[in-house]
Image: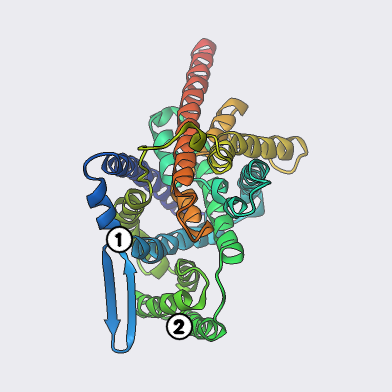
Amino acid sequence: MNDSYANRLVTGVREFLRLQAAAGIVLGIATVLALIASNSGLAGLYGVFLELPVEIRLGALHFGKPLLLWINDGLMAVFFLLVGLEIKRELVEGELSSLRQAALPAIAAFGGSAIPALIYVLCNLTDPVALHGWAIPAATDIAFAVGVLSLLGSRVPSSLKVFLLALAIFDDLGAIVVIAVFYTAKLSVVSLLLAAAVLLVMLALNRLGVTRIAPYALLGIVLWVFVLQSGVHATLAGVATAFAIPLRGTEDDSPARRLEHALHPWVAFLVVPLFGFANAGVSFAGIRVDALTDGVTLGIAAGLFIGKQIGVFGAVYASVHLGIARLPEKVDWMSLYAVGLLAGIGFTMSLFVGTLAWETDEHAASLRLGVLGGSLLSGIAGYLLLRFATRREQSHVQAGD
């Protein structure tokens, strides 16, 4: 790897971290506004906003959905497009491009997904409907997690930040697979074949060296329509589009890099906050104590807060002591445990999976309470432990001087 490429990679990671930190703050504000709106005189207006009918007609083709579903099915496809672009870049030329670099965050992500899911299942063994939500506590919200990490500034080593980013990327990749395999409705073979045909055209354009973004964007919209009609969740069209867009070329002429750079602020400051605002609103009116202790709420909260820290730290500890991987540079065990706690902030992806788990709103309040509670506990505990760990490290360095 030459010096100029390494410098561009470091600069890109820094810009990504700054953007994600700011995005975490905006997402936090959107969440607070949703909670205020749903627990005040604005509750009725908030409900009307989410149920606002939005229709698109193209000749005989007609799509009519409430605004909430357009956000969850449409705008979140753009979010997954960006996630797909990030995953592709990291796998091809970034921190995950070699087995040695990718091993530790991949193992950590697996442990950090499996243990929360297991805890959720144990909390809901007697309720087959509630069990549909087993994957809710398995993912990490990268914007919130990096936002909390950024509060400690330069005291956090860059290697720890990169590890958290890589862990979250593998988490997102796992969530994409789970959604595709386990949260897919009855399939339409015709729509799937049409979607596959569109994807093949996009891949052919890639092989032919087409580097303009417009053809991929137009075909991506067509792909989204067919995937929406197929029964596979429409957001996966975003991931498929991302992997079809060429990455090759320099920073200026790579379509994938240009699109990722262009989408980042829109996703960070519009798509994700709007999703958070639309899905985080939970009314506390009439909520009884048993709502806080039912299987769904407890399974999600315990999965995020307890399962994530055990899964991430346990997987890393085992892999390091077995010689499979090694700790990142300048990272001690306490700091890594703190990152395991921060991985329990599952907000955006957890809420999204929750919208797919059940066809009715029976568990809506429990979903939101569990996600908010588990994410809040994880964020506070992770921040406090990491603050203590970095202060201790600084005192050791000063004592050595």
- The residue drawn where x is 33% and y is 81% is 62
Using residue 218 as the reference point, say whether residue 137 is left or right of it. right
Relative depth, front residue between 314 and 14: 314
Is 304 rendered above or below residue 352? above
Please say which color scheme the image uses: rainbow
Label 1 CA crowd tier, 10 Å (few <14, some 14–19, many 20+): some
In terms of image quadrants, where is residue 328?
A: top right
**Disc 2: which residue:** 205
Q: Nearer the viewer, residue 135 or 246?
A: 135
Residue 254 in view here: no
Q: Secondary structure at mark 1?
A: helix
Q: Name the outermost residue toward the right.
A: 322
Residue 265, quarter of picture: bottom left
Circle nearer the N terminus (2, 1): 1
Q: Residue at coordinates 56% horizontally, 68% vertically from top-left?
A: 184
Q: Is residue 93 above or below residue 111?
A: below
**Residue found 30% across the figure and 60% down from its top:** 51
As drawn, the label of residue 297 is none
| Mark 2–mark 1 distance (CA, rounded to whole Å) | 39 Å
Q: Position of residue 352 (x, y in %)?
A: 46, 54
> Which is more foreground, mark 2 or mark 1?
1
Question: Which residue has dot 1 on it?
Answer: 51
